[in-house]
Image (cartoon, rainbow, N blue to C red):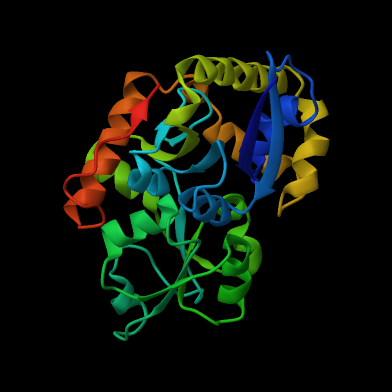
Amino acid sequence: MKRIHLGISTCPNDTFAFHGILNKCVDFRGLEFAIELLDVEELNRRLLAGDFDVAKASFHAALYLTAELGVLPVGSALGFGVGPILLGARPETRPGDRLMSLAGGELPHVLCPGKHTTATLLYRLFHAGEGREKQVVFSDIMPALREKKADFGVCIHEGRFTWKDYGLSFVEDLGSTWEANTSSPLPLGGILVRHRLGEECMATLSAVIRDSLSYAEGHREEVVSTMRLYAQELSEEVMFQHVDLYVNEWTHDLGDIGRSALVTLHERAAAIGLLPPAVPRLTVY
């Protein structure tokens, strides 16, 4: 059997899609999985350090490893007019202005969920120089804003459905801003795979992951227990809101729209100097 070291995040759309693999509900087709579930930025860091054969990680991180990694056509999260949200600590904050204006003209403190997350890339694309950026674990951002330990925060995962519970203010949906500026859906994260595994193994991996995704879609009530083990927000309604937002037909196959979105992400990151000019584009297998 071919052993695959697999990393996935604890967010509901990942535990939903990988329920069939985590619980051995699908045929592994001769593969064997050693699985770790981690925060998305920890996955990014471990992937950059050379860990994992396969991982669901941020497309921002993948841009730095195109010589080593490709993207499987299955398992990606694309946002259509939606994505990470920018929140303010002060209830009186209003959307539409520059962050410095919203913070009273001073350079505000802005919390981001990890240096290599696509959320941080979006913040740097649209709000460069507008705040003092600090990287923290995503689940710490809204509690810190509630306690006024920072002025703004870029929130991911279930935060887009629960931020009102923290008494925060909505500033901007960075996914909507991305689409308005690029006319492209937002490629948030995907299944990244080492080129060295070879295309035959990648095809098998894609088939197993697609089977797991289809199994979850046909057994939604069964999957709840797996999502609840790892989700920051335990409400079944919130977990499925998150799943239904990002698990769609492009999760089954990126298609031309998803591939084009990845090219746009590469071009935008390169345009602001986050990528060396010679870095090749991501390969989608």
- Look at 33% across and 24% down and name the residue there: 257
Location of residue 151 with respect to 209 vertically, above or below: below
Foreground of the two, 95 or 131: 131
Can the viewer see residue 229?
yes
Q: What residue appears at the point 62 percent right and 41 percent down from the top-left corner?
A: 8
Q: Quadrant of residue 104?
A: bottom left
Quarter of the image with the N terminus in it: top right
Residue 7 on image: x %, y %: 62, 41
Depth check: give the residue in front, 259 or 158.
259
Relative image position of residue 145 (x, y in whole percent): 56, 74
Rendered location of residue 180, percent (x, y): 27, 43
| Image quarter (top left, top right, bottom left or bottom right) of the C terminus | top left
With 185 as the anchor, is 149 left or right in this view?
right
- Is 123 on the left or on the right of 231, as rendered? left
Task: Evaluate whether residue 240 shows in this view.
Answer: no
**In which image quadrant can residue 226 be found?**
top right
Residue at horizontal 30%, vertical 41%?
179
Q: Nearer the viewer, residue 239 or 11?
A: 11
- Please determine whether, in this image, residue 266 is positioned above or below residue 140: above
| 197 and 213: which is toward the camera | 197
